[in-house]
Image (cartoon, coloured by chain):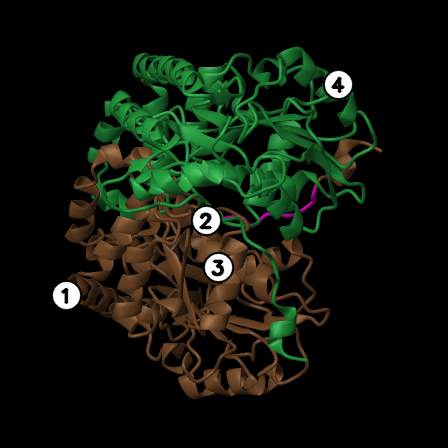
Chain colours: A green, B brown
């Protein structure tokens, strides 16, 4: 018996590459635009003397700002170090049944990793052939439900009435809707949090708020769910969000005009890119996100991925069943998209 | 059966108060001095555009800086969101035996909370009457060992040869030495990490580096232990340290002169304060930290605590067996200590 026998064995999630240097980075769904200038000002105005003190463990100003923005009570808001922190804690807090939790077979691959980490039984429910969810699949006994809406890496959004169908069918389970990309889509489940006590909606500042570098995520749900999340958070680490993250989050939320501008721009570029890709022989799933999930009629995705990489253009390729013929391409700015198009024309062109 | 039956029930740790406004805050062992000016410059020079990108998930520059500073390999360094994040992950990673882990009955109260959170059996070993550790108590079968050195809230340091005795006696357990306060003490167990593969030393930037507000902690140990910690970290949240925290940590580590100055100043003030308190009828444990653990011969600790609070002076009182007659007083700057002395003279004086 050695100490090594008692070490937790896990297979970690592998994040997208973070290449350094002058590359075109379309592989981790970051924003091509900087965060709001309000964020720059908030960080520049930090009194560095105050860094000697612990941050507010409740991140009260950020919780208040989120509550005000979405017109919910402060008791309905939980904040964490990016939505991954929030989701990991939600798995740990809510998924303690002997029955399997349910999630789609093609989705954010961290769900499986968290289930393994916390010894949660799970069942992967196949998406339909068109990568949409069949809501009937989620109406059986389970220990919890989680799905991303819009889904990743497909970009496909489930209409709100179908989201509600799943929540309604599972009053005895916590249903987590992971809305990392919803600002680029249509209808958020936030409108349902006051109606269903078992609903938790998880969001992030990393995508539409262009703040991946500061690590700010949050959840909105019933006061009961939020209280339970806070108990686990305060059993893990009292002070998770540092002062800079708290200030940056508040600042980003305070600049709606800029937010609307960059989100619209990304959506416009997405649709423009989709049309061009289709002309080049790509098939594109309908996207409600800041990325496109595409496959080419003739050239294998893996080849395209590798040839783009040689040209210092990074997109995401998943060597996984069902999706190994697809590429996930983050929507960048016009210049990045033009470079991508030129490169793709060379790779798939005649 | 309701969803509530599957919610994790825990009793969270209660951090020290974070009162706002113009108070004298000697209750959470923060530094009375600001962090290094290098930190201010590092934060001011963050290119806010870069915040749209995810931070380096490995926090490579910070890991390198710590490795260089302590002359260990990069593979021996793990970083997290304060030492609480590192410790929580270490509990989760290393303490998976059916046998109880061992820690002192009077120590950092988060140990019990983490044990409960991760369902780890534990045994609290009574400290001796003088609040020192009896190393023989840690030479029995166990699932792991953790102790703070110097200990909190007592401030008492175990000599390095006795620390080594415990590590040596437990080759089949991971032994965690929590050195949050060691920079104010004498001998770190870091000198032993190359000798004992089962040793993990955990440290923080929150105390001696005056950086509580940025949340930076780290662990140093054998490459095997660090690899296991990283696997759990990358199964929880890919990006824990934000860009500001990474930069601030590197900057703080690069200003040794300032570090030496503020640590010496705090140690001098500590000894000066101790002498004055003893003259006032307080009994003070010998401290190797940035706080004093004291009790008065006549006036109950709780009364002193409450009367100080009325004067807007916050110290820490623990209503716990064995230590409910003590106060933990953080060492502040000269002005804060003078105000404390005047207040105490009024409270305990004749």
How far across and down, in percent of the image, does residue A240 sit? 44, 44
N-terminal of the pair, mark 1 or mark 2, is: 2
Pointer 3 residue: B230
The residue that appears at 69% across and 15% down in the rendered structure is: A162
Label 1 crowd (10 A; few <14 / some 14-19 / many >=20): few
For mark 1, name the chain: B
* Residue at which label 1 appears: B257
Q: Residue at x 48, y 36 (%)?
A: A301
Q: Is residue A129 above or below residue B302?
A: above
> In this figure, what is the number of numbered marks?
4
Looking at the image, residue A210 sits to the left or right of residue A84; the answer is left
Residue B94: in magenta span? no
Closer mark to the observer between disc 3 and disc 2: 3
Residue at label 2? Answer: B16
Using the numbered discs, state the Cα–Cα distance from disc 1 to disc 2 in whole angstroms.
30 Å
Secondary element type, mark 4: helix
- Choose between A281 and B281: the one closer to the eye: A281
Residue under the image location 62 percent in, 62 percent down: A9
Label 3, label 1: how far apart the Cα atoms are: 32 Å
User: Of discs 1 and 2, which sits in the foreground?
Assistant: 1
Instruction: Please identify the quarter of the rendering in which residue A6 is found.
Output: bottom right
Q: Is B12 rendered above or below residue A87?
A: below
Residue B110 or residue A158, whichever sits in front: A158
In the drawing, does residue A293 fall left or right of residue A344? right
Provide the chain ID for the residue under circle 3: B
Residue in the foreground of this view, choosing between B63 and A290: A290
**Image depth: mark 4 or mark 2 in front:** 4
Q: Are the two marked residues, 3 and 1, in contact with CB atoms closer than 8 angstroms?
A: no
- Range of magenta residues: B8-15
Can you say which quadrant of the picture contains the N terminus of chain A? bottom right
Along the viewing direction, whichever of A306 and B164 lies nearer the viewer? A306
Q: CA distance from mark 3 to mark 2?
A: 29 Å
């Amino acid at each position: 018996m050695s100490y090594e026998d008692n070490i937790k064995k896990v297979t970690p999630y592998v994040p997208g590459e973070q290449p350094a240097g002058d590359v075109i980075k379309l592989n981790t769904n970051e924003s091509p635009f900087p965060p709001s200038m309000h964020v720059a000002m908030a960080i520049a105005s930090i009194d560095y003397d105050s860094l000697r003190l612990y941050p507010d463990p409740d991140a009260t100003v950020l919780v208040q700002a989120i509550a005000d923005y979405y017109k919910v009570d402060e008791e309905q808001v939980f904040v964490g170090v990016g939505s991954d922190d929030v989701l990991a804690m939600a798995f740990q807090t809510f998924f303690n049944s002997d029955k399997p939790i349910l999630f789609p077979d093609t989705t954010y691959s961290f769900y499986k990793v968290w289930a393994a980490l916390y010894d949660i039984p799970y069942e992967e429910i196949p998406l339909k052939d068109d990568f949409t969810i069949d809501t009937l699949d989620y109406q059986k006994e389970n220990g919890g439900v989680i799905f991303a809406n819009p889904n990743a890496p497909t970009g496909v959004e489930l209409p709100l009435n179908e989201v509600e169908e799943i929540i309604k069918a599972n009053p005895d389970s916590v249903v987590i809707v992971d809305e990392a990309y919803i600002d680029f889509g249509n209808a958020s489940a936030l409108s349902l949090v006051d109606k269903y006590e078992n609903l938790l909606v998880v969001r992030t500042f990393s995508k539409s708020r262009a703040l991946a570098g500061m690590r700010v995520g949050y959840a909105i749900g019933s006061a009961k769910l939020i209280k339970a999340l806070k108990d686990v958070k305060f059993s893990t680490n009292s002070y998770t969000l540092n002062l800079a993250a708290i200030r940056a989050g508040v600042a980003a939320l305070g600049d709606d005009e800029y937010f609307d501008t960059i989100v619209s721009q990304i959506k416009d570029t997405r649709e423009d890119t989709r049309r061009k890709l289709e002309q080049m022989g790509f098939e594109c799933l309908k996207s409600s996100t800041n990325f496109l999930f595409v496959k080419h009629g003739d050239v294998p995705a893996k080849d395209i991925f590798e040839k783009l990489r040689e040209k210092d253009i990074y997109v995401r390729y998943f060597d996984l069943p069902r999706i190994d013929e697809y590429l996930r391409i983050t929507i960048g700015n016009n210049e990045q998209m033009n470079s991508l198009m030129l490169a793709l024309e060379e790779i798939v062109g005649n």
